[in-house]
Amino acid sequence: MRHGQAGTRDAYDSLSDLGKRQAQLLGEYFISQNIRFAAAYMGGLSRQQQTAHQVATAFVAAGTSFPSLTIDRGWDEFDLSRVYQEIAPQLAQQDANFCREYEDMRVQVRASAEKHGAPIHRRWLPCDTKLVQAWICGRYAYRGETWEQFRDRVTAARRKMNGIERHENIIVFTSATPISIWTGLSLDIFDDRVMRLAGALYNTSFTVLRLWEEQLRLQSFNAVPHLASPELCTWR
């Protein structure tokens, strides 16, 4: 499952109040559907862990057991802040449109400060897309994790899930791109098209993948039955 709505662009690794509510509702939904888990994993990022603890708390409040949460940084999202820091100046020198969009975004972020509801914090902008595409393609110098290294890290997380019986449920609290990479594996999609899947994911949506004879099969994608009203549905 994806984490709840996060904070502002300059403080993204935390849940907003709405994000906490979304996660609580998801926990209550699982309980109402009698969905139980044999194991639970979460990435090392604060927004992922806060989401996991909200869901676990809902189970405990209902008097229902929830497995111990195991931290696995293989489920962390890629570091968009570092990508911006290192690649954006290079891209801005070659792409005037990106430069203009990027500077406009920075002005809006400074102006909105801690206003969680400001549109700049809740939209994926053209400059975001251009930047991530440049990182995926590896066209610019970058000292951080490459797209290929990131993808390999996420897919390798499967090998760490040991001791689970065939028909038991595992829940993983992660982010949009790792979910999309795993969904892509089930659909034999390995390139930048997985980012189109990531862009569609609601906060606290869950995607169900089944492991059948060592093959991943997509059961459902981006489900949000626990978010009953439009104001609860967010993408960022």
Image (tube, grey):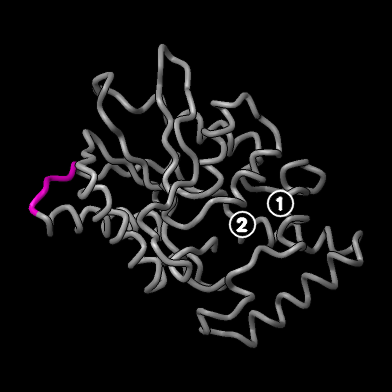
Q: Residue at x 53, y 49 (%)?
A: 176
Q: Earlier in the sequence, mark 1 or mark 2?
A: 2
- Residue span colored magenta: 63-67
Classify 10 Å Cα crowding around label 1: few (below 14), some (14-19), many (20 and above): some
Residue ID for mark 1? 132
Residue 15 location in percent, x, y? 40, 67
Q: Which image quadrant is residue 107 in?
A: bottom right
Disc 1 versus disc 2: distance between alpha carbons?
8 Å
> Going by the image, does 97 lie left or right of 14?
right
User: Hey, what amino acid is under mark 2?
Assistant: Leu
> Going by the image, does 202 lie left or right of 159?
right
The residue lying furthest to the top in this view is: 213
Q: Secondary structure at mark 2?
A: helix
Q: Nearer the viewer, residue 173 or 152?
A: 173
Provide the major secondary structure of the magenta segment. loop
Q: Residue at x 89, y 66 (%)?
A: 97
Residue 40 location in percent, x, y? 28, 40
Residue 127 location in percent, x, y? 76, 63
The relative height of residue 104 versus residue 208 in the rendered view (above or below) is below
The relative height of residue 91 versus residue 43 in the rendered view (above or below) is below
The residue lying furthest to the left in this view is: 63
Classify 10 Å Cα crowding around label 2: few (below 14), some (14-19), many (20 and above): few
The relative height of residue 215 versus residue 20 in the rendered view (above or below) is above
Residue ID for mark 2? 80
User: Hey, what amino acid is under mark 1?
Assistant: Val
Residue 191 falls inside the magenta stretch:
no
> Going by the image, does 32 lie left or right of 147?
left
Q: Residue at x 77, y 70 (%)?
A: 102
The residue lying furthest to the bottom in this view is: 111
Residues at circles 1 and 2 in contact by the CB criterion of under 8 Å: yes
Residue 53 location in percent, x, y? 26, 57
